Amino acid sequence: MIPRGETVQQGPKSARTRARLKSTAFKLFREDGFSNTTLRAIASESGLSLGSAYYYVESKDDLARELFDELVSELRAGLASALAEGNTLEHNLRTLWDGLLDAVEPYPDCGVAFLRSRPTLPPDGGAAIESAIDSARPQAPLPIRQDLPKLVGLVTHAILAFWASDTSPGKRRSRLLVRRAAPLTSRVAVLSRLPVVRTLLDELLGLVRAVAPRHAGS
C-alpha cells in the first residue's frame, strides 16, 4: 500500500485518474467554494474512495496550487496579444493585473488557499510580468530595469492578497486598487532615475529579497 501523501506512478491510467480528480476539484471549488469542499467530496464525485484519492493528491491545498498555476498559465497565454509593443507601462500593468483578477474571479473563496499553497508566483507569472515590462514603451530607465520585475511581482502579490480578503460587492475595491496601482507603479519606475527615489526603491527591494522566498520570476 502506498503511504498517504505519496503519489503513484503516473502511467496513462493514473494520469487520467489524477486529471479527473483535478477537474472535479476545480468544479467544486468554483461551485461550492474552497471552504465547503472536502477532499472526501472530491474523491466521491470522481468515483474514488478517500484513501485512493490520497494516492494522487496530498491535500486540498495541493489542488488549489495546481488550479492557481493553471489560471496563471492561461493568463500568460492570453496576454500575448494584449501586450502589443508600444503600450505604456501603466497600460500593460493594468492589463496584467485586471487579467489576473479576471482569472481568479470564478474562485472567490480560493484566495487564501492560493496564497497559502503558492506563496510566490509560479514561473508563468514571472514570465507574464517580464512580458508586460519588456513590451512597454518607453522602456523603464536602465538603472531599474533589472529590478522592476521584483517590484511588480511584489505589487502583484499584494493585489492578490487584497483580493483574497476583499468583501466589497463583486470585489470592486480590488479593481479600484488595480486602477490606482498601475499609474503609481509606473511613476515610481520613471522617477527611479532620481537618486532619492532610487535609494528608497533599493531599500524596499532589499527588504523584499531578504524576506521573500525565491521563485522563477524573481
Image (cartoon, rainbow, N blue to C red):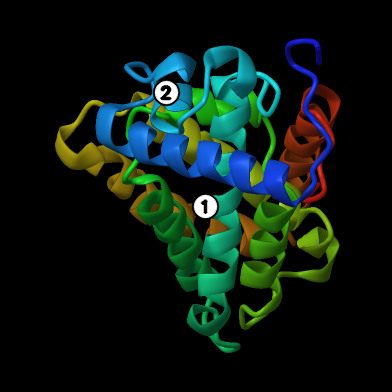
Circle 2 sits in a helix, a strand or a loop, which is it? helix
Question: Residue 195: x, y in percent?
Answer: 78, 52
Question: Residue 110: x, y in percent?
Answer: 42, 29
Which residue is rendered at x = 50% and y = 62% of the image? 96
The three-letter code of the residue at mark 2 reads Ser
Question: Residue 182: x, y in percent?
Answer: 46, 57
Which residue is rendered at x = 47% and y = 44% of the image? 23
Return the residue at label 1. Answer: 71
Which residue is rendered at x = 73% and y = 38% of the image? 200
Whether residue 194 is visible to the viewer of this picture, yes or no, is no
Could you give the CA–CA distance between mark 1 and mark 2, rounded to whole angstroms? 25 Å
Which residue is rendered at x = 52% and y = 84% of the image? 81
- Say few, some or many: other residues with alpha carbon within 10 Å of mark 2 (under 14 / 14 to 19 / 20 or more): some
Circle 1 sits in a helix, a strand or a loop, which is it? helix
Foreground: 72 or 33? 33
| Residue 211, picture quadrant | top right
**Image quadrant in which the N terminus is located:** top right
Q: Which mark is residue 149?
A: none
Vertical side of 172 occupied by 152: above or below = below
Return the residue at label 2. Answer: 44
Whether residue 176 is visible to the viewer of this picture, yes or no, is yes
The first of marks 1 and 2 along the sequence is 2
Q: Is residue 58 found left or right of 171 in the rendered image?
A: right
The three-letter code of the residue at mark 1 reads Leu
| Residue 168, picture quadrant | top left
